[in-house]
Image (tube, grey):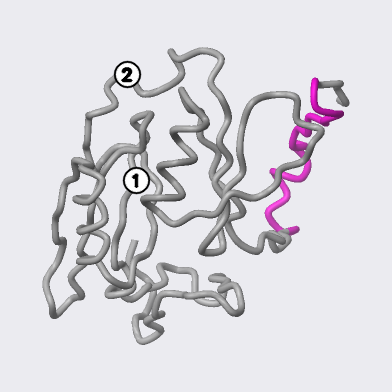
Amino acid sequence: MEQEGTNGTYSEINGSNDTKNNKEEQHDVPLMALNHVSRLCRSVKDSVDFYTKVLGFVLIQRPQAFDFDGAWLFNYGVGIHLVQAKDEDRLPHDPDHLDPMDNHISFQCEDMKAMELKLKEFDIKCIKRTVGDEEAGAIDQLFFNDPDGFMIEICNCENVKLVPQRSIGKIKFPPGRHNPPLDLDSDGLEA
């Protein structure tokens, strides 16, 4: 069903029961990589300042067809699309709440100490922790919030190998990008 929106035409696509139930007919998903993460914000300007100064994103031009306040940022092969919130009830209610088990986006980091110093420079409250041990591949993590209370993780997750779980041959790595090490010595049968 095609609908007109304030920013163009969009189509609603519903899956067909015939396709869902026919397990013999499976198609590869033609995805390549994560393109962007979209964030509502109280102040586009404050969020742009945060993502550019703290995380090193770069402001890029966004399509002029958009008739709402927002900004596009890009770096590290991923975009951040900021959208001015019309209803602040859709934003996190406690912008100081940090719980690593909550929703968050995570960025791979090659120098955790430098990132920790950057957060201190901007007086950003964070949780610092290490998960695992050196033998299995310890992961250092920093958790903090953006100005609107959306949680961000910075980690050195490349220390842990990806071990396929019944998925050998299905993992796709984008060419020319940083990818974690892959452990193909495992039988891949663990649940």
Secondary structure state at the residue bearing disc 1? strand
Judge left or right: residue 55 versus residue 78: left
Judge left or right: residue 4 versus residue 108: right
Q: Residue at x 73, y 61 (%)?
A: 27
Camera-nearest residue between 163 and 131: 131
Amino acid on which the number 1 mark rests in the picture: Ile
Secondary structure state at the residue bearing disc 2? loop
Which numbered disc covers residue 152? 1
Task: From the image, tell me which residue sits under label 2.
Answer: 93
Mark 1: few, some, or many residues within 10 Å (few <14, many ≥20)?
Answer: some
Q: Position of residue 21 (x, y in %)?
A: 70, 44
Camera-nearest residue between 140 and 60: 60
Q: In which quarter of the view is residue 5 placed?
A: top right
> Count of labels shown?
2
Going from N to C along the chain, the mark reached first, 1 or 2, is 2
Camera-nearest residue between 141 and 190: 141
Q: Which residues are magenta?
A: 6-25
